[in-house]
C-alpha cells in the first residue's frame, strides 16, 4: 500500500487504520486466498516435520493452540480478528464450544459465513465489529464471558494494542485464557534495517509499527493479563517465508490469472487505481518479509496469558 497517502507515515497508519484495513482486506483477501490459502496465520513446524506437508503442519499448529487455551474445558471461545473464519470453523469442528469470530472487514466476513451456510456448525457465529471496541458489543453471544480468546497474526494492525488487550480481557471470565500470536520486531534493529526493511514492510501492510516481545510483556500486565509463557516461534515458522516467496514468484509467472485477480481487487472497493497498486505491492512485500525473517529482525511471538 506504499502509494496510499494514509499509510505514508506510522502516525497516518495509526490514525487511519480502519480505512486502511477495510480497503486492504476487502480488496486483497482473494489474492491471499488464491496464493496463500484459507489460513492467514503461519504454520508452526516441529523438528523433523515435512516442510512440504502444510496441511499436517496446520493441523498440529491448531491442536497446539487449542490445548493452550484449555482444550475441551473451554466452553466459549472468542476468535479475535477472525478474518475469513477458517480457524473459527476448525475450532467449532474440534470442540463442542460456542465459538464467536469477530472481524471488521465485511469482505472477510462474507467469506467467513460460508462456513456456517446451510445451518452447518450451529456452535459457530460471526460478528462484524472493530476489535478495538469489543466493550461496545451488545450482541447476545457476548452476554456471557468467554473462557478463552485467540488472536492470530492480527494484533500488529491495531493502533493501540494495550487498549485492545484491555478490551479482550474484559470479555474473559476471571482465569480465562488469551493466546495471542503476532509478528514482532527485534528489540534493537539498526537504523539501516529500519529504513530498508521494517519501514517498507509496515508501510506495504498498513501496520503502524511492530511490537517487541518486551513491549507485549508490559502491555499484557497493564491489561490485567498474567503471562503463563511467551515463546519466540521464529525458527519454527521458517518454511512459511519460503512458501510466501515462491507463491509471489508463481503469481508473477501467471499473468492471465493474476491480471484477473487484480481487476477483481480494483473493482471490489472505491479508488480502484489505488487498490490496484496496493495489490501489486503485496508481491514485493513477500520478498521483504522473507528478508526480514532471515535477517532476524522480524520475529514471530506467541503469548499465553490469563485474566487475573
Image (cartoon, rainbow, N blue to C red):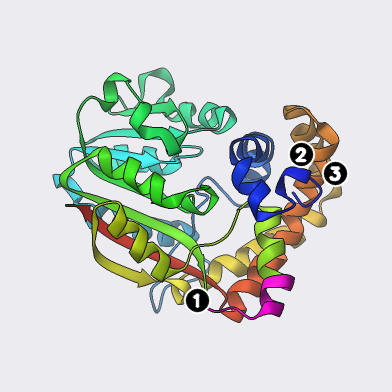
Nearer the observer: mark 3 or 1; the answer is 1
Q: Is mark 1 on a helix, strand or loop?
A: loop
* Mark 2 residue crowding within 10 angstroms, few (<14) / some (14–19) / many (20+): some
| Highlighted range, magenta | 187-196
Residue 66 drawn above or below residue 126: below
Nearer the observer: mark 3 or 2; the answer is 2
Q: How far apart are marks 1 and 2 (CA)?
A: 38 Å
Give me the disc on residue 2. none
* Mark 3 residue crowding within 10 angstroms, few (<14) / some (14–19) / many (20+): few
Give the mark, 1 or 2, whose residue is nearer the N terminus.
Answer: 1
Give me the disc on residue 256. 3
Q: Where is residue 157 in the image (x, y as percent from the top left)?
A: 54, 49
Quarter-of-image position of residue 213: bottom left
Q: What element carries label 3?
A: helix
* Mark 1 residue crowding within 10 angstroms, few (<14) / some (14–19) / many (20+): some
Q: Which of 156 and 11 is in front in this view?
A: 11
Disc 1: which residue:
187
Looking at the image, how many numbered discs can be counted on the residues? 3
Q: Is residue 113 left or right of 76 when viewed as pictured?
A: right
Tell me if label 3 and label 1 are in contact, CB under 8 Å: no
Give the mark, 3 or 2, whose residue is nearer the N terminus.
Answer: 3
Disc 2: which residue:
261
Quarter-of-image position of residue 138: top left
Amino acid at each position: 500500500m506504499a502509494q496510499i497517502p494514509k499509510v505514508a507515515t506510522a502516525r497516518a497508519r495509526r490514525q487511519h487504520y480502519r480505512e486502511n484495513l477495510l480497503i486492504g482486506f476487502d480488496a486483497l483477501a482473494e489474492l491471499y486466498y488464491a496464493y496463500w490459502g484459507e489460513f492467514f496465520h503461519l504454520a508452526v513446524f516441529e523438528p523433523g516435520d515435512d516442510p512440504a506437508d502444510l496441511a499436517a503442519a496446520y493441523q498440529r499448529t491448531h491442536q497446539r493452540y487449542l490445548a493452550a487455551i484449555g482444550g475441551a474445558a473451554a466452553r466459549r471461545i472468542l476468535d479475535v480478528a477472525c478474518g475469513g473464519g477458517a480457524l473459527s470453523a476448525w475450532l467449532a469442528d474440534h470442540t463442542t464450544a460456542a465459538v464467536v469470530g469477530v472481524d471488521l472487514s465485511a469482505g472477510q466476513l462474507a467469506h467467513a459465513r460460508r462456513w456456517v451456510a446451510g445451518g452447518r456448525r450451529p456452535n459457530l457465529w460471526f460478528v462484524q465489529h472493530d476489535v478495538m471496541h469489543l466493550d461496545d458489543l451488545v450482541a447476545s453471544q457476548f452476554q456471557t464471558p468467554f473462557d478463552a480468546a485467540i488472536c492470530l497474526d492480527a494484533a500488529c494492525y491495531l493502533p493501540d494494542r494495550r487498549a485492545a488487550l484491555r478490551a479482550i480481557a474484559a470479555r474473559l471470565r476471571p482465569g480465562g485464557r488469551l493466546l495471542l500470536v503476532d509478528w514482532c520486531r527485534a528489540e534493537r534493529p539498526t537504523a539501516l534495517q529500519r529504513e530498508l526493511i521494517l519501514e517498507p514492510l509496515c508501510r506495504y501492510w498498513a501496520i503502524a509499527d511492530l511490537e517487541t516481545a518486551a513491549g507485549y510483556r508490559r502491555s499484557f500486565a497493564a491489561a490485567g493479563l498474567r503471562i503463563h509463557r511467551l515463546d519466540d516461534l521464529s525458527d519454527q515458522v521458517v518454511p512459511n517465508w519460503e512458501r510466501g516467496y515462491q507463491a509471489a514468484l508463481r503469481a508473477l509467472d501467471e499473468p492471465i490469472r493474476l491480471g484477473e485477480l487484480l481487476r477483481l481487487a480494483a473493482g471490489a472497493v472505491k479508488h480502484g487505481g489505488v487498490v490496484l497498486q496496493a495489490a501489486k505491492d503485496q508481491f514485493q512485500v513477500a520478498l521483504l518479509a522473507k528478508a526480514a525473517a532471515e535477517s532476524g529482525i522480524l520475529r514471530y511471538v506467541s503469548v499465553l496469558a490469563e485474566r487475573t
